[in-house]
Amino acid sequence: MSIFSRRPRTASLTIEDNAVRYVRLKSIDPLVVEAAEELLLPPNTIVDGKIVDAETLTILLEGVLKEWGIAKRDVRFLAPDTYVLIRKVAYPDDVELDELKGHFFIEIGSTIYLPFDDPVFDVVPYTPAIPGHEAILIASKESILTSYEDVLKSVKLDPVACDISPLALYRLAHRLFAYDGSEHVMLADLHAGQLTVSIFHDHYPLFMRPVDLDQAADLAISEFETSVSPTISPRSIVMELDKLMNFYRYNMLNGAASITHLLVNGDYAEMEELLALARDRFSVKGQVLAGEPLRLPDGQALAPAFNRTVGLALKEVT
């Protein structure tokens, strides 16, 4: 091998219910996206994060990898939000840091219960400004992640890393706003008809919850207007955010602090009304994650749907 040759960079793909997206960054400071590609998926290829038609997904991916320039590359992807859990958990004083993962491996299923029967997890020590030993537990469902890996391997890609969307979006938010960690940041991510809410403090993810927008819908539609698809009103979304803000403030922090910054990500037709309602109700700094859209070198603006993929690509440099 030539000493001047370089291993190709790991490609960043997000695989969601409605689309597969890929981005390649040109520079980090300033943040410049060199390429962005999107493959729309037929309905029922992936449903609520679960691959239900692996054959169709495989065929469609095979058709674009060479065009995107990532054939036979290492790739990183996002675990589907529906199958991700973030929890702050206490652990005994006598557990050393290098024993932390082993400790939780034993505790999961005995004293710590997760909504997955086959969990895969990581754990990070958390050092807040209060006494005690706590860690951030991030878990997902192994069989779901394996199904994504199997599809990627079947098209001769090598899945080398899996990330989660809250970390990807916070990575982008930190790049854009240079948070110092003192903030209590709520990320409200609207994507593919779903809402995922996460909360960060001291740059740690402390909370994550997918919200069922169908159940939260404010169906202000006459019973005779059956042909009209119900939409989620800004008021309904704000009500859900209010519940989660209160849970964070009173259940997790015992009233000692509250959300200071609200960032909304996604393509939502009533975004301005949503932000106005949120600012009025919460008295927080509420804004769109990328108020000035990221752009390709030719000036084309990237849709908000690419923000998760951009944040995933930033993993390579953080």
Image: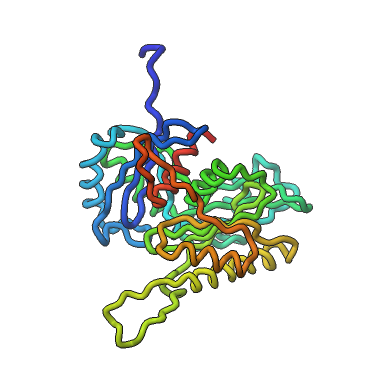
The residue lying at 51 percent from left, 55 percent from top is 288
Q: Position of residue 103 (x, y in %)?
A: 63, 49
Q: Quadrant of residue 220?
A: bottom left
Closer to the camera in the image, 99 or 287: 287
Q: Total number of numbered labels?
A: 0
Nearer to the camera, 258 or 136:
258
Q: Residue furthest right?
A: 131
Q: Position of residue 97 (x, y in %)?
A: 67, 42
Q: Answer left or right for 62 relative to 157.
A: left
Residue drawn at point x = 37 percent, y = 60 percent? 192
15 above or below 159?
A: below
Q: Is residue 24 left or right of residue 275?
A: left
Q: Residue at x 63, y 45 (%)?
A: 179
Q: In the image, 254: left or right of 268?
A: right
Residue at 57% from the left image edge and 58% from the top image edge: 286
Dividing the image into 4 quarters, which one contains the N terminus? Answer: top left
Is residue 120 shown above or below 231? above
In the image, residue 129 sits, relative to residue 318, either above or below, namely: below
Query: In this orientation, which residue lies closer to the viewer: 142 or 3?
Result: 3
Q: Position of residue 209 (x, y in %)?
A: 52, 62
Quadrant of the rendering where the C terminus is positioned: top right
Residue 159 spot, x, y in % from top left: 38, 39
Q: Is residue 36 above or below residue 252?
A: above
